[in-house]
Amino acid sequence: MQTMTRSESAMPGASVIEGRHVGKTFGGGSVIALEGASFDVTKGSFVSLVGPSGCGKSTLLRLIAGLIDRTSGQLTVHGVPVTGPHTDVGMMFQRATLLEWRTAVENVLLPIEIQRSVTAADKARAMELLAMVGLKDFAFSFPSQLSGGMQQRVALARLLQTGADILLLDEPFGALDEFTRERLNLELMRIVSEVGATTLFVTHNILEAIFLADEVMVMTPRPGRLARMVHVPFARPRTPELTLTPEFNALVAEVRDILGTH
Amino acid sequence: MAVAADIAAAGGPSLRQRRMLTHAAIFFGLVALWEIGSRAGWLDPLFFPRPTDILASFWRIYVTQGNIWYHLFVSLSLVFAGFIAGSVLGIGLGALVGMNATVRRFLQPYVIVLEATPRIAVAPLLIAALGFGVTSKIAIIMLVCFFAPFINTLSGVINVDRDRLELMRSLGASKLQTLRKLVLPEAIPVIMAGERLALTAALSGVLVAEFIQRDKGIGTLILTYTRNLNMASAFACIFTLTAIGFLIFKGMEVLDHRIAFWKNEAGLRRVSTKRARGWAEKGGAVHV
C-alpha cells in the first residue's frame, strides 16, 4: 500500500541543521546530558526524536534553539554556528506557555511585537493562522477560556507566526489526552507540509515518532546518545490506517530493538 | 435542594434573606444590650459609652460642629501621598532587584533584617531626622507602605514561569521586553495583593504619625477626645476609621478585579468582548 518515496516537501541533499559530535554536560562536566551527536537534518523534512527520559532529546532541541550552549562539537543552522537564540527557529513546549492576559490572537502576535511593530498584514496573518489551526471563532478568547488542546493550537499558530522555517517541538501534545493528541498530530502533519517547514519533534512515543516523521532519531540514555537515524519511507499524506500495516509495525519493532539493546 | 424548592414555592424569604435577618437581629440585640448595660451601670461608661451617645457624637462632629472633615481631609491626603510614594518605590525597587540576580544576592540579608524590624520603631528617628511637619509624617507612612509591595513584586518577579521565560528567550526578547510583556503582567496579581496590605498599613501609619506629632488629623482628634474623656466622640472617630478601612478594602478588591481581569470569569468575558470590538474598529480583518 505504501510506496517507498520521500516526503514531497523534502529536498534531498540540502541540510539545514548539521551536528558534528555535539555534546552537553551540566554541573561542570559531572552530568553528561548528550554525547557525540552527529546528524544532518534535510530541508523541509520532519524528524522525530524518540527515546526514554534522560536520553538528551530535549537537550538537543534546546541546543539547536540556542537556549543553552553546547560544551563540545559543532552545530550549525543554515550553515551558521549556533551561539544563542535566533529567529530562524521557533520553539513549542509541552505546556502552551500562553500569556493569560492576552487573547488568542494577541498571543499569536507576540513574536511579531518582539521583533517590530505590528501591521494590519500581521493581524490578518494571525487570524489566518488561527483559522488554520481550527480556532477561527476563538480569536478573542483568553487562554483560561480554552481547553488544553485548544491552547496548544494557539501555541502552534504563534509558532507559525514567527515565520521561522525550522520548528522545534518539545512533546507539544504530551500533556493532552490520547484522542486530542492523535487529532492534533494529524493536523500538525498537514500544517507543516502546508507551510513547508523543517520540523524536529520530540516524543517518547515510538508509534507517534514513526507515524509523523521522514527520519527518526533514536536516542538512548545515560549518557544521552544518538543511537541511530531510522528512515521512514511511507508516502504522504498519511492516514491512521498506516499504523496497522506490517511495514509500519516492522519499523516500530526496529526502533524498539535499538532502544532495547542499549 | 428539595427543601429550598419548597420554600421558594411557598414564597417565603430565601436562605440569604433569612441569614441577613439573623445577622441584623444579633447585631441590634448586642447594641441594645450595650445600651441597657451602660444605662443600668453594669458597663463602665469610660470604656463603653452608650451607643446613643456615640450616635449623638457622630451627629455633632459631622454636622453641627463639623470639625472632623478637616482632620479627615488632612489624614487621608497624607495616607494617599505616603501610599503612592511608598508603593511606587516598593514596586520599582522590587522589579529592579528581582530582575538582577547579583543585586538580589547581596541585598537579601538586609531585606530580611529590615523586614524583621517593626517599622513603627523607626518613626521617632524619622521625625528627629526630618523634623516635625508633613515631610516626616509622609516618610513614616512611606516606610510602612514600602515593604509589602516591595516583597510581593520581588517574589512575583522571581517566581515568573520558567517555561514562559524560555519562550521569551527563544523569541529573541530583550530584558526590557521580557519585563514589560511577561514579568510585570504575570506579577500583577501578587503586586496588587501587596498594594492592598500597603494601603491598610498606611491607615495605621498615619495614626502613629499623628499620635507622635499631635497637631492635626484624625489620630490627633482621637487622642484629644480620649484625653478629655469624651469617649463617645473618640468612638465615633474610630468607627469612621472602620468604615474607611472597609471602603479601602472593597475599593482595592474592585481595582484588583479590573486590573488582574484574567483571574476572574466576569473580567475575562468583559475584556474579551472589548478587545474583539477594538479589533474590528481598528480595521483588523476579522473573518466572520
Image: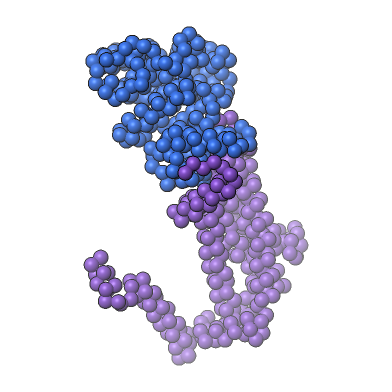
- Judging depth in this view, the residue of B47 and A109 nearest the camera is A109
Across and down, in percent, residue B224 comes to 66, 78
A53 up-or-down from B2: above or below: above
Structure colour scheme:
by chain
> Which residue does the image show at 54% across and 37% down from the upper left?
A124
Residue at point 41%, 37% (across, down):
A134
- As drawn, the residue found furthest toward the front would be B288
Q: Is residue B268 left or right of residue B172?
A: left
**Residue B26 visible:** no
- Image position of A73 with respect to B161: above or below: above
Q: Chain B shown in which color?
A: purple
Tell me where residue B219 sits by quadrant.
bottom right
Which of A109/B282 is in front? B282
Chain with blue colouring? A
Q: Quadrant of the C terminus of chain A?
A: top left
Left or right side of B8 for B151: right
**In screen coordinates, is B91 left or right of A146?**
right
Quadrant into which the N terminus of chain A falls? top left
Residue B38: image location, x then y, percent = 48, 87
Q: Can residue A112 be seen in this view?
A: yes
x and y percent of residue B17 in the render? Answer: 37, 74
Nearer to us in this view, A3 or A142: A3
Rendered location of residue B22, percent (x, y): 36, 77
Q: Name the residue at the top extreme.
A: A13
Identity of the residue drawn at 68% across and 64% down: B78
Which residue lies at the image location 48% right of the left edge and 45% below the top edge? A140
The answer to which image quadrant residue B71 occupies is bottom right
Q: Residue furthest toward the bottom?
A: B40
